[in-house]
Amino acid sequence: DAKTTQPNSMESNEEEPVHLPCNHSTISGTDYIHWYRQLPSQGPEYVIHGLTSNVNNRMASLAIAEDRKSSTLILHRATLRDAAVYYCILRALNDYKLSFGAGTTVTVRA
Amino acid sequence: SAVISQKPSRDICQRGTSLTIQCQVDSQVTMMFWYRQQPGQSLTLIATANQGSEATYESGFVIDKFPISRPNLTFSTLTVSNMSPEDSSIYLCSGRASGGSVQETQYFGPGTRLLVL
């Protein structure tokens, strides 16, 4: 399985943007980049996913490098409710499974 | 989307006993999964619950220890058998919605917090 590398933790101030990096230098051409987050005492929830082009949804934006060896999840205006562990996951084209790494723990200061 | 509930939400059990965790989805899902999250750790996939047939287990997990049933498209159970303190973890159920691509979103239950004494 292709592996991802994320910083252990990041801190942000409320109302400011948060940029969460993810390195995936061994990504294959058909691997999708998924982001999930796990709020305290809850199960993970889907955030966003993409293949090659940048993606936006109501929760976040995903910026994918041109060579696809890295990506960045962008939370445009962090709120206290965004404090969570964020997981960057690669999924092969026909792979139903999610393989979770250690993720990045995001702390948001009021 | 799908909403997933689990019962019980938490339990404290004695070693050597077994606990069955129930997972209910509010809509039909094509695939269901069971994960374990040990204290302070990330999630590890235990198995894929297959409707009407034996579950598919990941390396390191066996049916005798974690028997799984899935009698229909919206319900599954995971049993943690002959428990030891090392089984103290959060157990999470997940489902992938019907239709769509393989990259379809997975939905997770809130987890069952198990403490084995």
Image (cartoon, coloured by chain):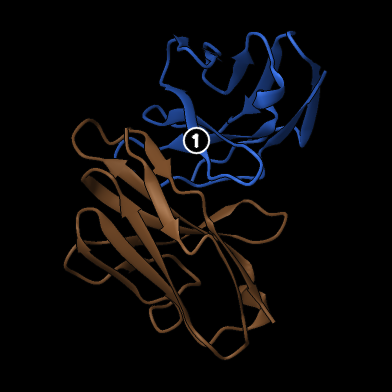
Quarter of the image where one finds residue B24: bottom left
On the picture, is B90 further left or further right than A109?
Answer: left
On the picture, is B81 further left or further right than A109?
Answer: left
Q: In x, y percent, where is residue B36?
A: 54, 61
From the image, state the color of chain A. Answer: blue
Residue A97 visible in rendering: yes
On the picture, is A99 further left or further right than B101?
Answer: right
User: Which of the pair B15/A52 is nearer the observer?
Assistant: B15
State the count of labels.
1
Q: Amino acid at mark 1?
A: Glu
Q: Neighbour class for label 1 at 10 Å: few (<14), some, many (≥20)?
A: some
User: Which of the pair A35/A91 is nearer the observer?
Assistant: A35
Q: Secondary structure at mark 1?
A: strand
- Residue at (52% x, 20% y) in the render: A68
Q: In x, y percent, where is residue B80?
A: 48, 77
User: Which of the pair B3/A85 is nearer the observer?
Assistant: B3
Q: Which quarter of the rendered picture does the C terminus of chain A lie within?
A: top right
Residue on which the image places disc 1: A45
- Residue at (59% x, 30% y) in the render: A25
Image vertical order of residue A4 relative to residue A70, above or below: below
User: Which of the pair B66/B109 is nearer the observer?
Assistant: B109
Q: In x, y percent, where is residue B6?
A: 43, 57
Image vertical order of residue B32 relative to residue B11, above or below: above
Q: Which chain is brown in the picture?
A: B
Q: Tag 1, which chain?
A: A
- Residue at (50% x, 47% y) in the render: A99
Residue A96 visible in rendering: no
- Residue at (46% x, 68% y) in the render: B59
